[in-house]
Image (spheres, rainbow, N blue to C red):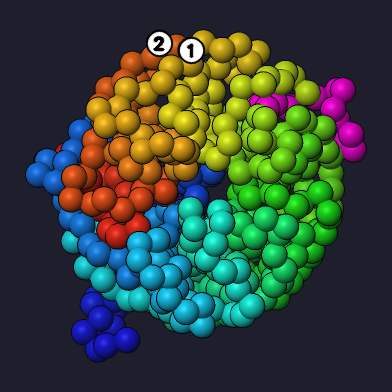
Amino acid sequence: MSRPIIAAALLLLATTPASSFAEDWRGFRGNDGSGISRENVPVPASWSTTENLRWSIELPGPGSSSPIVVGERVLVTSYSGYGHPIGNAGEIAGLKRHLLCLDRQSGELQWQSTVSAVHPEDTYQGFITEHGYASSTPVSDGEVIVSFFGKAGVVAHDMQGKQLWQTDIGKQSGTHLWGSAGSPILAGNVVIINASDESLSIRGLDKSSGKEIWKAEAKGLENTFCTPLLTSVAGRDEVIVSVPGEVWGLAPASGKLLWYASTATDGNVSPSPVLQGNTIFVMGGRRGSTAAIRLGGTDDVTNSHLSWSSEASSYVPSPIVHEGYLYRVSDRGIAHCLKADSGEIIYQQRLSSSGGFGGGRGFYASVVLADDKLYSVSRSAGVFVLATGPRFRQIGQNKLENDESQFNASPAISRGQIFLRSDKQLYCIESK
């Protein structure tokens, strides 16, 4: 790290006031995994290379992970040296992951940490070419930043970029060789990792040292790619994990299975659970299913706590639940709105795109909500903005014409700014 970058990082630390947790976006889909910005501030509905674009910076490589925001810092991961989606894939021995810290106001690089791959690593073939080697979004509590790099392990840094620890969580590969996708979450001092691809396990690690606190192993974790969700009901904390055919509630301090319910999420599960009140919503599977399950049960709660189920689903993107409605935009570009209390479909409408969606699965990113608007990032056709409520209304479609790379990541929203990453660039969008 050069002296100017070190000096800039120290200056940022010294001059930046303590941030409000509520204003930050500290993990995958925000502080609580809901995908909802709770701030009451305007967020732009339109932008381009000449409108409402505050800054953009070139990234050292591609990635499907989302940026996070902690105070005046924006953090994002990427990979380089192997598996580039355009041109020669390179040599697997050269694979590296990167964690970047940027100033949110200017996009200036504050520091960068590079983590070398640990081999054997999955080769760049099949479905892994669709998302690459930096698909897990980091998480932070304002004291540490935790990143998950698959077979290279879980890596923690302090806020100035010093690596604190690196923990191996396994080097197996799933039967499909699709790689890792779920993101780490924090439950107090416990880092929770979906290591289904690496070791068919969910891990709880000590935030300070990286040492393993617990490991929950199960063959049923095969093809589980979602990010767990931390919830609390009647004073009991639970970590919710959706797996093929079931949903589990685990104790975050011990990994103990508290309850489970059968679902019709077959094949593989990518969407992450969401919560409204005391009801959890899960979806996924190759044929597709959505289920609503009340929290607070013990052991098998399928008959007692399953509120409703539906065949309508999403293959990759996660949903939003807000003011009684469950929203999602499927990987095929179809917007859905369901009643959260019954599963009744209010609308399903294909998004209107001026240039199509590029064929195949056009959406990997999950919808997020801010300023009473839904933002859905497509892989190549731009960001679609929809109105909330029971009537479908598409407000806009925003495409950054100079960037033809893939946009696989869900955006981060904080203080009216949208942080959007592609395989080439990171953008800050803000009303001017």
Please report the residue visible at 35 percent of the width from the left and 66 percent of the height from the top.
87
Which image quadrant is residue 172 in?
A: bottom right
- Assess whether residue 290 is covered by the magenta stretch: yes
- Assess whether residue 72 is covered by the magenta stretch: no
Looking at the rendering, the stretch of residues picked out in magenta corresponds to: 289-305
Three-letter code, disc 2: Arg
Mark 1 neighbour density, 10 Å: few (under 14) some (14–19) many (20 or more): some
413 relative position to 341: left or right: left
- Of residues 204 and 336, the one nearer the viewer is 336
- Of residues 261 and 251, the one nearer the viewer is 261
On the question of residue 368 being in view, the answer is: no
- Of residues 120 and 359, the one nearer the viewer is 359
Q: Quadrant of the N terminus?
A: bottom left
257 relative position to 70: left or right: right
- Of residues 19 and 402, the one nearer the viewer is 402
Please report the residue visible at 47 percent of the width from the left and 43 percent of the height from the top.
364
17 relative position to 116: left or right: left
The reply to whether discs 1 and 2 touch (Cβ–Cβ < 8 Å) is: yes
Which image quadrant is residue 255 in?
A: bottom right
Dot 1 or dot 2: first in sequence order is: 1
Mark 2, residue position: 391
Which image quadrant is residue 169 in?
A: bottom right
Cα–Cα gap, marks 1 and 2: 7 Å
Which structural element holds mark 2?
loop
Determine whether 74 is above or below 431 in the image: below
Mark 1, residue position: 347
- Which mark is in front, 1 or 2? 1
Please report the residue visible at 78 percent of the width from the left and 48 percent of the height from the top.
250
